[in-house]
Image: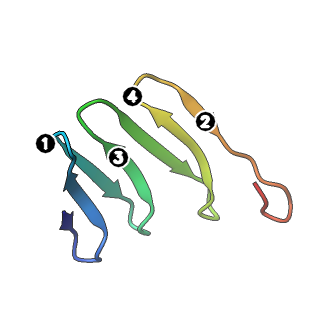
Amino acid sequence: FAYDAAGRLTSRRCPDGTNATFAYDGTGRLVHAENAAIAYDFAYDAAGRLLSVTDSAGHRVSYAYDAAGRR
């Protein structure tokens, strides 16, 4: 396992011997994760709520919130 100065996980060795890496934005939110097989990008709104997750094959899962902030 490897961590950045803020204590966030930046990489880990997977059981199959490959590495997984993780990247964060300036506010500490996970914005990218990848391993040998696939990558994921995470998008957030101005309130910091997760809006979407897109994989490297182009598949996207989107999230919406009501006025109370419930997903």
Q: Pointer 4: what residue?
A: 56
Q: How many marks do you count on the picture?
A: 4
> Relative to 52, does residue 66 appear above or below in the rendering?
below
Mark 1 → mark 3, Cα distance in angstroms: 17 Å
Asked whether the residues under the numbered discs 4 and 3 touch, taking CB atoms below 8 Å apart as contact, a structural biologist would say no
Q: Residues within 10 Å of mark 1 (few under 14, many from 20)?
A: few
- Amino acid carrying label 4: it is Ser
| The C terminus, quarter of image | bottom right
Name the residue tied to disc 1. Answer: 17
Q: Which residue is identified by label 2?
A: 61
Q: Is residue 31 above or below residue 46?
A: above
The Cα atoms of the two marked residues, 2 and 3, are separated by 15 Å
Q: Amino acid at mark 3?
A: Ala
Which residue bears the numbered disc 3? Answer: 33
Which is more N-terminal, label 3 or label 4?
3
- Local SS, label 1: loop
Calculate the distance from the C-alpha at mark 2 to the C-alpha at mark 1.
Answer: 29 Å
Q: Counting residues from the N terminus, which is met first, the one under dot 4 or under dot 1?
A: 1
Point out which mark residue 58 bears. none
